[in-house]
Amino acid sequence: MTDDLEDIEHLAGSLLRSLGSGQRRKLLRRMGRDLAQANRARISAQREPGGAAFTPRKAKMPPVTGRGAACFLYPAGGSGEPRRVIMKSFTWGNDRMMTGFDIESGAIRSFEFGKIIKWLPVPEEYRNRTGGALRRRGGLRRKAMFRRLASGRYLRSQADDRGFWVGFSGKASAIAAIHHYGLRDKPSLRAQALRYPARELIGADATDREHMLDLLYTYLADA
């Protein structure tokens, strides 16, 4: 089937060149839009153009949930003296961040575990109390990778009378390249660089190629 498609595509190239520049631009713009949409659908389905499923994320251990309260000294902003932090309840995840209800600020805050200066006894009035369950946002969003990257804002197509391209725009192109080719990058500013699994985000399979040919023949028939 691949050899047959290649022969047909050589013929399709000749037919494309026989069209006027305005006709080619219109047809190639439609091809680019359709191929971009096909890639968005594959990314939503977490599959590569060849049909293989994306390499899954590395499983993370669930965060440790603190019982009761915690009290410690933490660096203040600027050159101020360390301040005492009392947290009614907290979670401690793999990112070495403690997140909980900070009594002094009256809101949920996060603190880097490695920056804690000194652990202190919890004041009597806050012992054996909790601030209720902490709702961690983003649990559902983390299940599907590259959802934002595959949106029309970042995954785009463009065409002229000589061809079309489908790819990512702006800073998203650098992020996409890291995952597409399996390159090294830092997940955060203070983290060590690690190599990401290669997950092919953009491409064209046999079905896409057949669709492009169908668009060409339909356009020629209507013309």
Image (tube, rainbow, N blue to C red):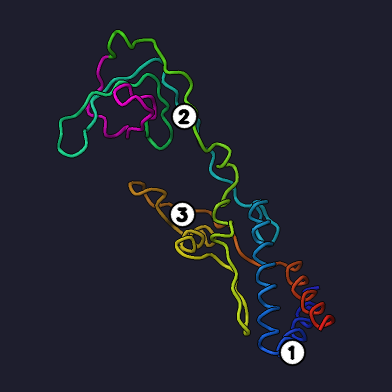
Label 3: how many residues lie within 10 Å, few (<14), some (14-19) or many (20+)? few
Q: Residues within 10 Å of mark 1 (few under 14, many from 20)?
A: few
Which residue has dot 1 on it?
A: 14
| Kind of residue sitting beneath label 1 | Ser
Packing grade of label 2 (10 A; few <14, some 14-19, many >=20) is some
Question: Of 58 and 109, which appears nearest the observer?
Answer: 109
- Above or below for 19 versus 183: below
Tell which circle, 1 or 2, labels the residue nearer the N-terminal end.
1
Q: Secondary structure at mark 1?
A: helix
**Given this view, does label 1 or label 3 mark the residue nearer the observer?**
1
Specify whether residue 203 is painted magenta.
Answer: no
Q: Which residue is mark 3?
A: 195
Q: Give the residue at the far right of this rendering.
A: 221
The span picked out in magenta is: 99-121
Three-letter amino acid code at the position of disc 3: Arg
Amino acid type indicated by mark 2: Pro
Mark 1 or mark 3, which has the lower sequence index? 1
**Residue corresponding to mark 2:** 63
Which of the image's four quarters has the C terminus?
A: bottom right
Closer to the eye: label 3 or 2: 2
Answer with left or right where residue 120 lies relative to residue 13: left
Q: Are marks 1 and 3 in contact (CB under 8 Å)?
A: no
